[in-house]
Image (tube, helix red, strand yellow):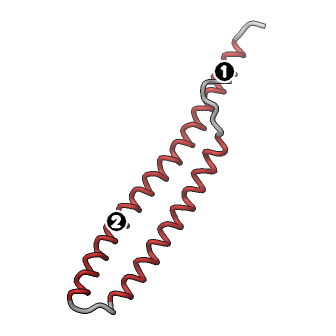
Amino acid sequence: MGLLDANVPQMVSSSSSFADQAGLMRSTIAQADASAQQAQATHQGDSAVAFQVAHTRFVEAAGKINTLLDVAGANIHEGAGTYTAQDAAGASDIASAGGALPA
C-alpha cells in the first residue's frame, strides 16, 4: 500500500454530488431573489430605498457565491480526473516495467 490511499470512485461521486448541491444552492438563491423582487413593491419611501440597498448587496453576494461554487466544482472535478489519469498512467508504467524484467 502506498502513502496515499485514495478512493477514486468516491472522488468522482463527490464531484457529481457537489454539482447537485451547488445547483440546489443556486436554485434557493434564485427563489430568494424572486421573493425579494416581489416584496419590494410593498415598500415605500425610506423603506423602499433601504430594501433596494439590501437587495443589491444580496445580488452581489449571490454572484460571488455562484462564482465560488463554479471554482470549487471545477477544482473537485479536475482533481478527480487528474488523479484518475495519473493513476492509470502509473499502473501502465508499472506494467511496462514489470514486462521488461527478465523471467
Q: 43 or 4, which is in the foreground? A: 43
Q: Which residue is mark 2?
A: 61
Q: Which amino acid type corresponds to the residue marked 2 in the rendered image?
A: Ala
Q: Residue at x 25, y 87 (%)?
A: 48
Quick one: SS at disc 2?
A: helix
Could you say whether the residue bearing mark 1 is in a helix, strand or loop?
Answer: helix
Residue 24 placed where, x, y %? 53, 67
Would you say the residues marked 2 and 1 are in contact, meaning their CB atoms lie under 8 Å apart? no
Mark 2 Cα shell of 10 Å, populated few (<14), some (14-19), many (≥20): few
Between discs 2 and 1, the one toward the N terminus? 2
Q: Residue furthest right?
A: 103
Q: Disc 1 marks which amino acid?
A: Ile
Quarter of the figure with the N terminus: top right
Quarter of the image holding residue 2? Answer: top right
| Image point (64%, 40%), residue name | 8
Residue shown at 61% from the left, 45% from the top:
11
Task: Say whether residue 11 is left or right of residue 39.
Answer: right
Q: What residue appears at the point 56 percent right and 42 percent down from the top-left corner?
A: 81
| Left or right: residue 5 compared with residue 26 | right
Q: Using the image as rendered, state which of residue 51 and residue 66 is in the foreground.
A: 51
Query: Does residue 101 sit above or below 7 in this rendering?
Result: above
As drawn, 87 above or below 41: above
Q: Which mark is residue 94?
A: 1
Looking at the rendered image, the quarter that the C terminus falls into is: top right
The percent coordinates of residue 13 (x first, y second) are 63, 50
The residue positioned farthest toward the top in the image shown: 102
Residue at mark 2 to residue at mark 1: CA–CA distance: 49 Å
Q: Is residue 103 left or right of residue 42?
A: right
Name the front one of labels 2 and 1.
Answer: 2
Q: Residues within 10 Å of mark 1 (few under 14, many from 20)?
A: few
Residue 41: quadrant of the picture: bottom left
